[in-house]
Amino acid sequence: MDLIDKETWVSMSADVKGDAYEGLLEKNAQDTKSGAGQYFTPRPLIQAIVDAMAPTPKETVSDPACGTGGFLLAAHDYVVKHYPNMTSAEKKKLRGQNFKGWELVQATARLCAMNMLLHGIGTQEHEPIEVGDSLAADPGERFDVVLTNPPFGKKSSTTIVGEGGQVSKERDSVERDDFWATTSNKQLNFVQHVKTLLKQSGRAALVLPDNVLFEGGAGETIRRKLLHDCDVHTLLRLPTGLFYAQGVKANVLFFDKKPASETPWTRKLWIYDLRTNMHFTLKTNTLKREDLDEFVQCYHPENRHDRKATWTEKRSPNGRWRAFDYKDLINRDKASLDIFWLKDESLSDSDNLPAPEVIAAEIVGDLEAALEQFREILADLGEAGSVA
C-alpha cells in the first residue's frame, strides 16, 4: 500500500487506477485459500481471445458470467488501441452503451463494477453490470460479440434447508423455450444461452471444459444443433495448469450465429492444440501472451476464411493447426469435438518429460478433477436414495 499512498489517488489517470486494481484482483486470485481464483480468467488468454475476435467501436460486447470484468475490459482496451480516431459519438457509446455483463455473486459484481469504473466504463444512465443468474431467463437483449468463461463445475444446484435443519441439494435443470435441450449441466446451458444472446451474424468465444466436447445425451443434442444452426469455426485446446481451479481441462470454442437454414452452417472446424506437449504452472511457468501468438496468427482475424493449416501428415506431423470437415465431425461418436492428433512425446521419450514441479502440479490437478467427479457421483447417489 505504500506505493499507492505516495501518489495522489484522485489525480491518477483511469489507466493507472485500473491497472493497479487489476493487479490487486490477480494477486487475490492467486491466493487459493480465498477461493477468488474461481472467477479469474488468466489475462494473457483473455487478450489472445480478444485479439482474435477483434471487436470494433460499432459492436456491442457482452459477458453473461463476467466475474471481475476481464473480457469486457480487454475488449474496451482493444477498441481504444486499434481505433484512435473515433468520433465523439463513438467514444460516448463506447463508454456508456457498448458493454454489458451479468454476475451471479454480489460481492464479485461489486469488484467488477469498481474495475469498470476505474477503467472509465459506465455512466450514471448506464450501469454495465447486472447482478443475477443470467441463465434464469432470456434478457431480451442481443449483442454483436459475446465473450465469456462460465463458472467451472458441471452441475447447477440449489441448497434447500428443510424442517429440522436438514440440508439437501436440488439439481437445477434449466427449462427455456429458446434452448435446444434441458440439462443441469451449467456449461451446456451457457452454450445455449450465448446462442440466444447473439444478434444475427453475432460472434462468440466461450471457455469451456472438455466434458462439453464429448458428453452424451443433452451434450450430443446441443453439439449437433450448434454445428448445424451456427458456424462453429474454431476450437482452441488449452493446456492444463492455467486456472486457479485445478484439474480443469478447458478449451475456447468460437462460433457465429446464423439465420435458419436447411443445410448446416458449419463447413470446417479449425482446431489449434495448445495442450499436447505444452506444460504450464500457476507460479513457475505461467502462460504469457506470446505463447498464444501462433494461435492468433493462425486464426487470421483479418479474414478467417483465408486460413492455412500448419499440420500435414508427412511434412509437418507436429503442426498444431488443422481443419476438420463438417461431415467428419457429425459422423464421430456422439458428434464429439474432443479431437487430438499430436503424439505425446513424454510417453515415448523420458528425455522430454516436463520439470518435476510441472508433473506434480498435473498429478494434483488430475486427482482434484477425479475427486470432484466422485463428489458429483456421491451427490447423485444421495439424491437417488432420498427419492427412493
Image (tube, rainbow, N blue to C red):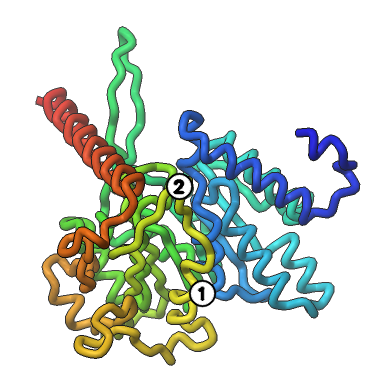
Quarter of the image for residue 89 reads bottom right
| Residue in front for this viewpoint, 49 or 134 | 49
Foreground label between 1 and 2: 2
Q: In this orientation, which residue lies closer to the viewer: 52 or 321?
A: 321
- Residue under pointer 1: 52
What element does badge 1 sit on?
helix
Amino acid type assigned to the residue bearing label 1 in the image = Ala
Tell me, yes or no, if residue 252 can be seen here: yes
Relative to 162, 121 lies left or right? right
Is the residue marked by circle 2 packed among few (<14), some (14-19), or many (20+) residues within 10 Å?
A: some
Give the camera-side residue of 97 and 325. Answer: 325
In the rendered image, the quadrant that contains the C terminus is: top left
Name the disc covering residue 282, or none. 2
- Residues 119 and 102: in front is 119
**Label 1, residues with CA under 10 Å away: few <14, some 14-19, many ≥20:** many
- Residue at the limit of the structure toward the top, as seen here: 164
At x 31%, y 7%, the residue is 164
Q: Percent position (x, y) of residue 128? A: 66, 53
